[in-house]
Image (cartoon, helix red, strand yellow):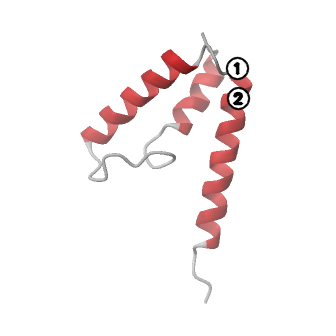
Amino acid sequence: MYDLLTTTALVILLAPGIVLTLPPSGGLMAVIVHAIVFYVVQAYVSPFVPSWGIWVALLVVLGIKAYVSRSSTPTY
């Protein structure tokens, strides 16, 4: 089983709006969908992906999100 820090990285990676935006209406249904996705990823992918793989994925996704949000802001 993953350690606490890797599970925290997985929670950040799978938080609503980071990778998934399902369902678009948000609210309680979005929380339920993301909880199910978190369970599936942690239960079925963790034996095949080392803990450092989750950290690399987290850094890549957050870097892409930061780059896209920075480049999409209008300059006046």
Q: Residues within 10 Å of mark 1 (few under 14, many from 20)?
A: few
Q: Is residue 23 left or right of residue 19?
A: left
Q: Quadrant of residue 4?
A: top right
Nearer to me, 5 or 23 = 23
Quadrant assignment for the C terminus: bottom right
Q: At 63% from the left edge and 48% from the top edge, which residue is drawn?
A: 62
Q: Position of residue 60 (x, y in %)?
A: 69, 46
Residue 44 image point, x, y percent: 51, 17
| Inter-mark Cα distance, 2 to 1 | 5 Å
- From the top left corner, tell me how far across and down residue 29 is, in percent: 26, 39
Label 2 is placed on what type of residue?
A: Gly
Residue drawn at x 66%, y 30% is 54
Marks 2 & 1, CB-CB < 8 Å contact: yes
Query: Which residue is under mark 2?
Result: 53
Give the vertical position of 34 relative to 6 (above or below).
below
Q: Which residue is mark 1?
A: 50
| Mark 1 secondary-structure assignment | loop
Disc 1 marks a residue whose amino acid type is Pro
Give whichever of 45, 23 is nearer the camera: 45
Q: Is residue 74 left or right of residue 63?
A: left
Label 2 SS: helix
Please, which residue is most extreme toward the top here? 1
Image position of 44 (left or right of 50): left
* Up/down of 48 relative to 10, above or below: above
